[in-house]
């Protein structure tokens, strides 16, 4: 019988391999036998790049799993046992590790690992589902989305005691967000659409209303997701 460390490696490795998947393809499959000349060199170079990319994805998935173990204060074997054979927890694990593998944001990798741990140890299915929603939202977000969400967690203008503001003054529009984050001006519409799609922001108006532009506010779910990123060490330049 394999010792516990080997058993851990086998089970954790299986989760990581399933999460990283074959979406990028195998580097070996890209190197065609007998293909020479400049094209063969180019294909080999692409194969090497893909191999490096897959290795880095695996590393990020492993870091997320390690974060889950540390957050839950469990060994890898104990965490695997917590996930057990439950379909919901297995799916949560795969989604969390897959999202971590593809992320370029370290704090997101940590937040995904913590969501994995919270779901694996949950006593109620509702908590597992909540953590799955968190993972799915984080999967769609990277650093620009996190920064916009952070910006939207405060009003677009300073609030002063005693002053009455119109709702339009306290709503975020695309143009106001671009003023606060001009580096993302060309992609702000895409950022807003992505965040709206995972319900971390909510629309406050529709076309034809009193607003000149569609207006948005951070949702309660968005504050939950933002909180997870901040707890994982996210720092945003104001």
Image (cartoon, rainbow, N blue to C red):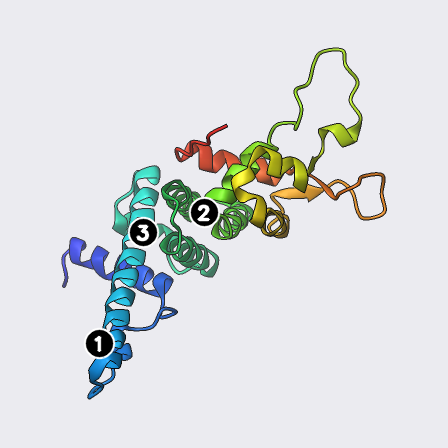
Q: On the rendered structure, is 90 left or right of 144?
A: left
Q: Given this view, does label 1 or label 2 mark the residue nearer the observer?
A: 1
What is the secondary structure assignment of the residue under circle 1? helix
What's the distance in space between the residues labelled 1 and 3, CA to CA?
Answer: 29 Å
Residue 52 location (% of width, % of height): 25, 61
Question: Outermost residue toward the bottom?
Answer: 34
Residue 27 location (% of width, % of height): 26, 72
Q: On the rendered structure, is 142 left or right of 180?
A: left
| Residue 72 in view (yes/no) | yes
Q: On the rendered structure, is 221 left or right of 6?
A: right
Residue labelled with disc 2: 119
Q: Which of 110 and 187 is in front in this view?
A: 187
Q: Residue 202 carries which label?
A: none
What is the secondary structure assignment of the residue under circle 3? helix
Who comes first in sequence, dot 1 or dot 3?
1
What is the secondary structure assignment of the residue under circle 2? helix
Question: Outermost residue toward the front?
Answer: 38
Q: Given this view, does label 1 or label 3 mark the residue nearer the observer?
A: 1
Who comes first in sequence, dot 1 or dot 2?
1
Task: Please tell me in which quadrant of the rendered image residue 10 appears.
Answer: bottom left
Residue labelled with disc 3: 60
Residue labelled with disc 1: 41
What's the distance in space between the residues labelled 2 and 3, CA to CA?
Answer: 19 Å
């Amino acid at each position: 019988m394999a010792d516990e460390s080997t058993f851990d490696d086998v089970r954790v490795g299986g989760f990581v391999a399933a999460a990283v998947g074959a979406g990028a393809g195998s580097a070996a499959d890209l190197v065609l036998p007998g293909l020479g000349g400049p094209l063969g060199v180019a294909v080999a170079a692409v194969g090497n790049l893909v191999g490096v990319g897959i290795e880095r994805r695996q590393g990020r998935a492993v870091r997320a799993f390690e974060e889950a173990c540390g957050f839950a204060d469990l060994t890898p074997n104990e965490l695997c046992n917590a996930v057990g054979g439950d379909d919901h927890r297995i799916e949560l694990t795969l989604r969390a590790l897959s999202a971590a593998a593809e992320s370029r944001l370290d704090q997101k990798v940590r937040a995904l690992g913590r969501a994995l741990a919270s779901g694996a140890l949950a006593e109620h299915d509702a908590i597992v589902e909540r953590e799955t929603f968190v993972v799915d939202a984080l999967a769609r977000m990277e650093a620009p989305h996190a920064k916009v969400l952070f910006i939207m967690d405060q009003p677009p203008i300073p609030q002063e005691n005693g002053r009455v503001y119109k709702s339009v003054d306290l709503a975020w529009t695309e143009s106001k967000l671009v003023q606060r984050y001009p580096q993302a001006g060309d992609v702000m519409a895409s950022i807003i659409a992505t965040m709206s799609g995972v319900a971390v922001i909510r629309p406050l108006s529709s076309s034809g209303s009193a607003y000149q532009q569609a207006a948005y506010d951070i949702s309660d779910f968005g504050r939950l997701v933002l909180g997870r990123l901040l707890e994982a060490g996210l720092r945003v330049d104001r």
